[in-house]
Image (tube, rainbow, N blue to C red):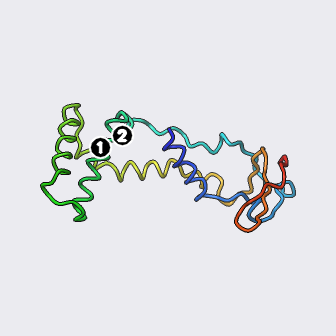
Amino acid sequence: MIKRVGLFLIGLLQSFSFSGIVTGINPSQTQSVRQITWGDLIPQAQAESDDPFAELTEDQLYELLMVARYRDLRQRGKLEPGGESEQSEAELVASLTAQGIDVDWLLSQRERVAAARRKQADIGATVSGQHISIPGYALPLTRDDETPEEKGLSSV
């Protein structure tokens, strides 16, 4: 869940800017302002069947990550073939295989699943180019040298 929220926030920041903050337009002065809530910005749940990693436990994900890391480092020449890392990788693969996990197939699905997650987290198309209003609070900040300071809390 934390990974999905983090990915959502990255997609949110990349996708749009708040028109009132960035452009200086007061949303209350325009007629085409669309009011949304923070809940509207949460991406719809992805079908679990599309994500083979969703069924793995934290330990299985960690072991799969380590296998991928060993392979990547070996491919880039950062690890010597036949060393301790290769034995560790073999043990991890054996452990995952014993649990019914096809390591090579899962690793081949990484890019597809990552692309699907990025697409799901991108809400920019729903608000891009629109003036939106999100009820809440704004904290105006000033900068003195490198330290931002809060000027006060104002209701939006």
Is residue 142 toward the left or the right of residue 71 in the image? right
In the structure shown, which secondary structural element does the residue marked by tag 2 occupy? helix
**In the image: residue 127, left or right of residue 141:** left
Q: Give coordinates of residue 115: x percent, y percent.
A: 42, 53
Q: Residue furthest left?
A: 82
Left or right: 115, with 100 as reference point: right
For image coordinates 23% across by 54% down, the residue present is: 71
Question: Residue 64 got which mark?
Answer: 1
Q: Are marks 2 and 1 in contact (CB under 8 Å)?
A: yes
Q: Does residue 116 sit above or below 98 in this rendering?
A: below
Label 2 CA crowd tier, 10 Å (few <14, some 14–19, many 20+): some
Label number found at residue 53: 2
Q: Nearer the viewer, residue 32 or 71?
A: 71
Q: Residue at x 41, y 35 (%)?
A: 48
Task: Tell me residue 59's x, y (percent).
Answer: 33, 35
Q: CA distance from mark 2 to mark 1?
A: 10 Å
Give me the residue at 71% from left, 42% from top.
37
Callout 1 crowding tier (Cα within 10 Å): few <14, some 14–19, many ≥20: many
| Quarter assignment of residue 14 | bottom right
Which of pointers 2 and 1 indicates the residue nearer the eye? 1
Measured from the top left, where is residue 32 in percent x and y?
A: 79, 55
Quadrant of the rendered image containing residue 60: top left
User: Along the horizontal axis of the image, is 92 left or right of 59?
Assistant: left
SS under mark 1: helix
Of callouts 2 and 1, the N-terminal one = 2
Query: Which amino acid lies under the numbered mark 1 shown in the image of this protein?
Result: Leu
